[in-house]
Amino acid sequence: MKLHWSPRSPQVRKVLIVAHELALVDRIKCVRTVVDPLLPNAQLMMENPLSKIPTLVLDDGRVIYDSAVICEYLDSLAGWQLTPSLFEERLAMRRRQSLGDGFIEFLLLLRNELRRSHPSSQLVGAFETKRRAVLAALDNEAHDLFASQYSIGHVAIGSALSYLEFRFKERDWRAGHPYIARWHEKFCARASVRATEFVDDE
């Protein structure tokens, strides 16, 4: 399998964490692929017309995207180790995955906005409001994250928090959120997370 990859993409990291957890990483060849919302990658668009990563090309030529779909596919290969069998637990996993993925999406938008010569104060303020709300919600959910079966939902939330730490070091998100901060420390200690550290190679 071929994975279009960047060492600083949180969505790619989520996929690689799952691949490590499921002992599938040796079956994946990572191909360094540069994407930019203002400069569509013509070569990548031949396999993913959205010009986005991660994009997984299977050995039979089929192409899978985005990160949630790729993670589900990898888990299917491994016998659903990261997907709970009970509906209520699976529903919680899906919600956590959506929360983590949504958090990543608006952190990426916030970063892009802050890099503009004249960022919109209204837009930045809206992102900050969402950031505080997500962290408060995660702090309230930390106990359940500790207690529940480790799943793709956990990976999505952990990846989002790691990206927040990677790109917004100046903002101490852990202050005032002790429970989710403690959970994130445990997440970061996993071998799969240590093996997929972000690298800023811009």
Image (cartoon, helix red, strand yellow):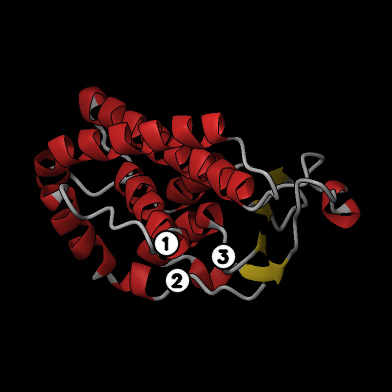
Relative to the observer, which residue lies in front, 118 or 186?
118
| Residue behind mark 1 | 17
Residue type at mark 1?
Ile
| Residue behind mark 3 | 8
Q: Nearer the viewer, mark 2 or mark 3?
A: 3
Residue lying at 71% horizontally and 47% vertically, measured from the top left: 52
Badge 3, how many Cα within 10 Å: few under 14, some, many 20+? some
Q: State the image coordinates of residue 91 (x, y, percent, origin top left).
A: 30, 25
| Residue behind mark 2 | 196
Q: Are marks 1 and 2 in contact (CB under 8 Å)?
A: yes
Q: The C terminus lies in which quarter of the figure? A: bottom right
Residue type at mark 2?
Thr
Specify which label sits upstream in the sequence, 2 or 3. Answer: 3
Residue lying at 56% horizontally and 50% vertically, measured from the top left: 111
Q: Is residue 172 visible?
A: yes
Residue at mark 2 to residue at mark 3: CA–CA distance: 10 Å
Q: Are marks 3 and 1 in contact (CB under 8 Å)?
A: no
Residue type at mark 3?
Arg
Dot 1: element: helix
Relative to the observer, which residue lies in front, 120 or 152?
120
Q: Quick check: 163 above or below 98?
A: below
Specify which label sits upstream in the sequence, 1 or 2. Answer: 1
Q: Quadrant of residue 182?
A: bottom left
Dot 2: element: loop
Q: State the image coordinates of residue 48 (x, y, percent, origin top left).
A: 78, 44
Residue at mark 1 to residue at mark 2: CA–CA distance: 7 Å
